[in-house]
Amino acid sequence: MIQAVKDLSRLRDITAVVARHGFGEFLERSRLAETVGFKPKTEPMTKEQARATSARRFREMLAELGTTFIKLGQILSSRPDILPADFIVELSKLQDAAPPLTHEVVLQRIQEGLGKPASELFESIEKEPLASASIAQVHRARLKPLPGETEGAQVVVKVQRPGIEEAIRSDTDLLFYLARFLEGVVEETGIYTPTGIVTEFRTAMLTELDFENEARNIEEFAKNHAERPYVVIPKLFRTHSSKTVITLQELCGTKLAEVLKRPADFDHKQLAKNILDASFHQLFTDGLFHGDPHPGNLIVLADSKLGLIDFGLVGRLSKGMQESIILLVLAVSLRDPDTVARLLYKVGIPDERINLHAFRTDIHDILERYLGLKLSQVDSSSLLEDLLDLALKYKIKIPKEYAVLSKAAATTEGIIRVLDPDLDVVEVALPYAKQLLYNRYNPQSMSGGFLRVLLQLQGFLQDTPAQLSQILMDLEGGKFHVTVKNDELVKLNTNVKALGVLVFMGAVANGLIVGAFFLAGRATPGEATHWPIAAVVGLALAAMLFGAAVAWTWVSGRLRKISLRKLRK
């Protein structure tokens, strides 16, 4: 009961914030108001102004709503398949900041998380935090020296805020109610169901709250990059880490955000090559890549070495996904719309059967528009946005790994363009692509695709006779069934049911009217001016049924679901 009251109070706060950041021009652009017969009075603005205003208001609204919604915005900023580019840019500006915890609370959280007082584990912990976010707070510290050491290692310790998990669960519960409502008014619920997005977001948030998961990511990155001297992964101190506390080696260098402001002061060409080389290794060799490589998460060390931090968001690619990416890049480079269409259809999850001819034609138009230019002139972010929007148009759901990868690739491309605009990306990527394709068809490689194809073929040849025999036996015994699904028949069935309900409501209303007048006619002459109560109630019910039937008939022909694809454009 107490939790329900808290949820209602939080819902009231959320509603007030949403109303305060009103979206009048959004309603006007979506024509939702026209659908219900209302035209909002808003000042005319250009298309660019409207898009910029909506994106900015959306960011400010999420920032005011607090921790859960800030994190929602940050996760959505890595999903260009869901939101348009201008929203992605605005959400990337979200600053996850919060009032700092007191030093006493930090020491208490360390003791709760590690099971020992902080004074037994750390030589010192600075009182002023390096960063104070809504989920955790980061402090510079020094470990106690090990035997034989004069001083302990310089580290950073990240401490989770108290009560954050309960707040996230409460807010996501409210988001589920909103998501269920949206599923009734959003057209593309078959592609990106609102409840599915909230479920994915909640899972990502609870995973981020478990610092053990981030610790495993750090260890895996360290193992993958052990033979690459130009990439530095901070050392994890397992004895000083838990689900709510994580301790890492401090990387002393310059954040890439500062380097980009004055690239001439650094060996920017070598740094660009190192960033690109590390990215391709993660993509084509490791299958594990940093999901948020923005300049704040990259640190430039001595000799242009690259330090990576913040491993809460990572992406994983299977061998099949890696091969599909290579083939897709080659198909785009060769301007082969047939192969691009086939690969997009293969990697995606179609919600329904699509018109492949129209799909190929649209892809051909996109490739012709972008790829008559040199590589340095091609804006891959716009190209990816158009391909993702095309997939949304044809109701092809793109797995989140590809969406996160496209955002990470666009971020990396922007960094490379600043550091070394003349760097030939294709030349750097070609060796990785060749090696990946070679491994795929190399019979001596146990990880190659050749043996997998042989195993699949062997399974097919072994299973096919048994399956054919089963079909023939079902045919002979009259047990063979074929299920045919037709959307038009489903719509017809729904319309027939609705017509039956309307006819039933009309019959009941007629009966109530006749009964009401019959009761009124039987009233005595002295009571002629006073209608019997039963007659009044019958007429009222008849009027309600009649009004409901008229409203249903009128509204069902006017109200349409909102198309996210049209709103994106």
Image (cartoon, rainbow, N blue to C red):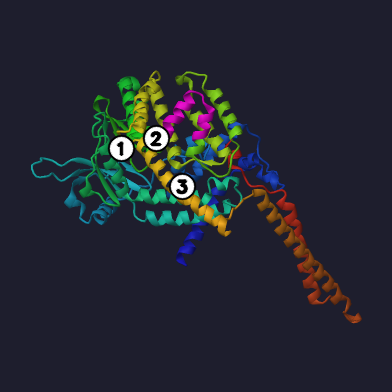
SS for dot 3: helix
User: Percent position (x, y) of residue 12?
Assistant: 53, 56
**Residue type of the residue flagged with mark 2:** Gln
Which residue is at the far right? 525
User: Percent position (x, y) of residue 538?
Assistant: 78, 71
Q: Magenta stretch?
A: 322-343
Q: Report the side of 357 relative to 535 (left or right).
A: left
**Residue type of the residue flagged with mark 1:** Met
Crowding at dot 2, Cα within 10 Å, few <14 / some 14-19 / many 20+, comes out as many
In the picture of the structure, the residue carrying the numbered disc 3 is 464
Q: Report the side of 559 relative to 170 (left or right).
A: right
SS for dot 2: helix
Q: Quadrant of residue 548?
A: bottom right
In the picture of the structure, the residue carrying the numbered disc 2 is 322
Q: Residue 446 carries which label?
A: 1
Q: Report the side of 506 relative to 223 (left or right).
A: right
User: Percent position (x, y) of residue 117?
Assistant: 20, 55
Screen quadrant of the C terminus: top right
**Cα distance, mark 3 to mark 1?**
26 Å
User: Percent position (x, y) of residue 507?
Assistant: 79, 66
Pick whichever, 338 or 265, lies toward us. 338
Which residue is at the far front? 476
Q: Nearer the viewer, mark 1 or mark 2?
A: 1
**Residue type of the residue flagged with mark 3:** Thr
Q: Tell me whether circle 1 and circle 2 mark residues in contact (CB < 8 Å).
A: no
Q: Tell me whether circle 3 and circle 1 mark residues in contact (CB < 8 Å).
A: no
Q: Which residue is drawn at 37% across and 24% down?
A: 430
Q: In which quarter of the image is residue 43?
A: top right
Q: Earlier in the sequence, mark 3 or mark 1?
A: 1
Which residue is at the far left? 148
